């Protein structure tokens, strides 16, 4: 994880580096730091904690210079202290690193034996020392980097500055993303196009194993075998406008309220309203020949995948395997020839998901990805790109990206069903009309904001909260619990409603609120029975259902939230809203940092 940026510029860089870090703070916010080249020196300033601390620090210890690197950190090796903050430096070299150097212990032992001393506990500092050794032995920066890269195992993106070469930087990527930006007489390095958006829209994406020597007017790229290569320069669509909260208190709140718009925007690319047909992007494989789908993702994206499993099986009778990426990759999954592997990711950079994607590719699977960042590594490595159009998601807890993923997956489920002869034209038209109702239903769900805000006072004092759901609403229970944990730090668990009686019911007492997601429909009665089992043991119920459901089972609940009556295909999209709002308002009552909750980061680019 972490965000890195580098500028070989013609004007002072500190302010611009800081701005770049601000745009990447979603990648981590445990510490931040800057190093510039000035008067033959490497000038460093670092601070523990959020970027605002570094900004304060820079006011008294400025870093002048026209060339520099900077970093925002999500701690992996070593506590989030100032001395573990990047850039790491020796007398000759300073660098910023995103990723993990897996063999850093043995490298560090070797360096220690050779008399080098370390100031941090990080894996990254060893790279600075290894390069420094080469430079001290008389090698050029290029030859030093060339000698060190093959010694490193793991995932990394690096930006390296050299004291005695003040007009250049070297960047390198393996596993973690790195882009080169081309400005007017300036060249930039960054973890993503968003970081560089105010500086340039002209971006080249480095390939796996590439490294690059950047000066003011040239970027010389080498591949993993040190051959000179050209990488295409494209125009990034990343917005240069500052990412603003507008009238909202938090990004998460803004993103929750954007959902009707961005879901409509996303659906626009997947349905033809006039023809009442589902329309997927062109594919160069026969989707009707797919006999099995393997879905892999992490976090909230994984829960979107779990919902899709219900849909693909129910509507298209298509068998689905699903796993979290960190387990999938290392459990030696059996993949049938001709299978489709589907990866879901907001960022398109999550290291576990990316490793799983590459594994499936090696195993000959067709690769489809549902991603929100169309220029991301996953998007570029896929056979079939299914973009979500949620726009930049800044709040660490995913909201609008999730509902947009669900919108794409619902359209994909319908498409599979049509291709497999499970939906005729009339049924397809009906499904499309339900999908098109989703934005209005999301709006209707958002109208309960004030009511949910009031309810949050009932949830905030709890130590534990349970969420129950059945069928495609079970993943929503998992997502509701995850949202609450992430931002309010209240322990929460999602359970399949029917599974309660096999253990978790032992936890129920008057202090444990139980949030039940139960749209009326074929599973309603059964879910309500499980809810009654909780109530009989003193559990306090928050029931989320439609009017019919609440009329039937709402009495005696601690609280109820009324959702519009919706088709099962869009229920998970709509029911996402109340669980998001409940987590959001509970966190506000508790006064936690909603957009940057402790210990988390938005894009996790380490395994
Ligand atoms: C992190 C974020 C989550 C996100 C997960 C997967 O843990 O905090 O919000 O769901 O990564 O990220 P992805 O970008 O692959 O969807």
Image (tube, grey):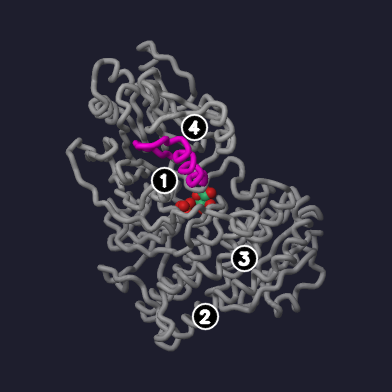
Give the quadrant of residue 375: bottom left
The answer to whether the residues at label 3 and label 2 have Cβ atoms under 8 Å apart is no
x%, y% of residue 36?
41, 29
**Taking 556 as reference, is 605 above or below it?**
above
Are there few (<14), some (14-19), or many (20+) residues within 10 Å of tag 4?
Answer: many
Are there few (<14), some (14-19), or many (20+) residues within 10 Å of tag 3?
Answer: many
Which is in the foreground here, disc 4 or disc 2?
A: 4
Which is in the foreground here, disc 3 or disc 4?
A: 4
Instruction: Judge left or right: residue 49 versus residue 225.
Output: right
Nearer to me, 377 or 202 = 202
Which is in the foreground here, disc 1 or disc 3?
A: 3
Q: Earlier in the sequence, mark 3 or mark 4?
A: 4
Which mark, residue 351?
A: 1
Give the quadrant of residue 229: top left
Q: Which residues are magenta?
A: 4-26
Are there few (<14), some (14-19), or many (20+) residues within 10 Å of tag 1?
Answer: many
Q: CA distance from mark 1 to mark 3?
A: 28 Å
x%, y% of residue 19?
48, 43
**Taking 150 as reference, is 419 above or below it?**
below
User: Of helix, strand and loop, which one carries label 1?
Assistant: helix
Residue under label 4, please give it: 33
Instruction: Judge left or right: residue 125 versus residue 336.
Output: right
């Amino acid at each position: 994880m972490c965000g890195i940026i580098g500028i070989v510029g013609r004007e002072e860089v500190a302010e611009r580096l800081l701005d770049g870090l601000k745009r990447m703070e979603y990648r981590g916010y445990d510490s931040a730091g800057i190093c510039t080249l000035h008067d033959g020196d490497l000038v460093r300033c670092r601070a523990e904690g959020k970027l605002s601390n570094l900004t304060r620090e820079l006011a008294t210890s400025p870093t002048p210079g026209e060339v520099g690197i900077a970093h925002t950190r999500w701690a992996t090796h070593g506590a989030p202290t100032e001395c573990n903050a990047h850039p790491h430096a020796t007398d000759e070299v300073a660098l910023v690193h995103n990723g993990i150097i897996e063999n850093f212990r043995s490298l560090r032992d070797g360096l220690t034996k050779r008399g080098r001393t370390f100031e941090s506990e990080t894996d990254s500092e060893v790279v600075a020392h290894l390069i420094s050794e080469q430079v001290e032995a008389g090698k050029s920066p290029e030859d030093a980097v060339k000698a060190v890269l093959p010694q490193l195992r793991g995932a990394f993106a690096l930006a390296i500055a050299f004291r005695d070469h003040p007009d250049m930087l070297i960047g390198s990527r393996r596993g973690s993303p790195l882009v080169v930006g081309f400005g007017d007489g300036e060249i930039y390095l960054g973890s993503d196009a968003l970081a560089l958006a105010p500086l340039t829209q002209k971006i080249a994406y480095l390939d796996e194993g590439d490294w690059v020597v950047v000066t003011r007017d040239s970027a010389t790229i080498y591949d993993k075998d040190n051959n000179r290569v050209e990488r295409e320069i494209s125009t990034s669509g990343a917005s240069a406008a500052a990412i603003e909260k507008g009238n909202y208190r938090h990004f998460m709140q803004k993103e929750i309220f954007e959902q009707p718009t961005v879901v409509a925007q996303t659906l626009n690319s997947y349905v033809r309203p006039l023809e009442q047909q589902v329309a997927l992007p062109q594919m160069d494989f026969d989707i009707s020949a797919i006999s099995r789908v393997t879905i892999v993702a992490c976090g909230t994206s994984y829960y979107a995948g779990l919902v899709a499993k219900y849909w693909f099986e129910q509507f298209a009778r298509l068998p689905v395997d699903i796993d979290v990426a960190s387990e999938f990759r290392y459990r030696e999954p059996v993949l049938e020839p001709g299978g489709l592997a589907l990866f879901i990711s907001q960022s398109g950079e999550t290291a576990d998901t990316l490793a799983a994607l590459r594994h499936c590719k090696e195993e000959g699977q067709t690769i489809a990805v549902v991603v929100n960042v169309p220029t991301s590594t996953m998007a570029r490595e896929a056979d079939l790109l299914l973009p979500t159009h949620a726009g930049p998601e800044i709040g660490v807890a995913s909201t609008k990206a999730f509902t947009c993923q669900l919108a794409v997956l619902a359209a994909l489920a319908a498409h599979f069903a049509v291709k497999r002869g499970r939906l005729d034209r009339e049924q397809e038209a009906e499904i499309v009309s339900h999908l098109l109702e989703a934005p209005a239903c999301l709006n209707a769900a958002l109208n309960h904001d004030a009511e949910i805000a009031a309810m949050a006072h009932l949830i905030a004092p709890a130590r534990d909260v349970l969420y129950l759901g059945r069928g495609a609403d079970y993943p929503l229970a998992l997502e509701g619990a995850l949202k609450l944990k992430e931002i309010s730090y209240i322990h929460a668990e999602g359970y399949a409603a029917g599974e309660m009686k096999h253990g978790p019911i032992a936890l129920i007492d008057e202090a444990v609120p139980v949030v039940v997601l139960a749209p009326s429909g074929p599973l309603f009665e059964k879910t309500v029975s499980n809810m009654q089992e909780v109530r009989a043991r003193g559990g306090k119920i928050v029931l989320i259902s439609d009017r019919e459901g609440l009329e039937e089972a709402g009495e005696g609940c601690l609280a109820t939230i009324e959702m519009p009556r919706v088709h099962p295909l869009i229920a998970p999209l709509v029911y996402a809203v109340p669980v998001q709002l409940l987590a959001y308002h509970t966190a506000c009552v508790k006064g936690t940092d909603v957009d940057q909750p402790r210990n988390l980061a938005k894009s996790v680019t380490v395994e």
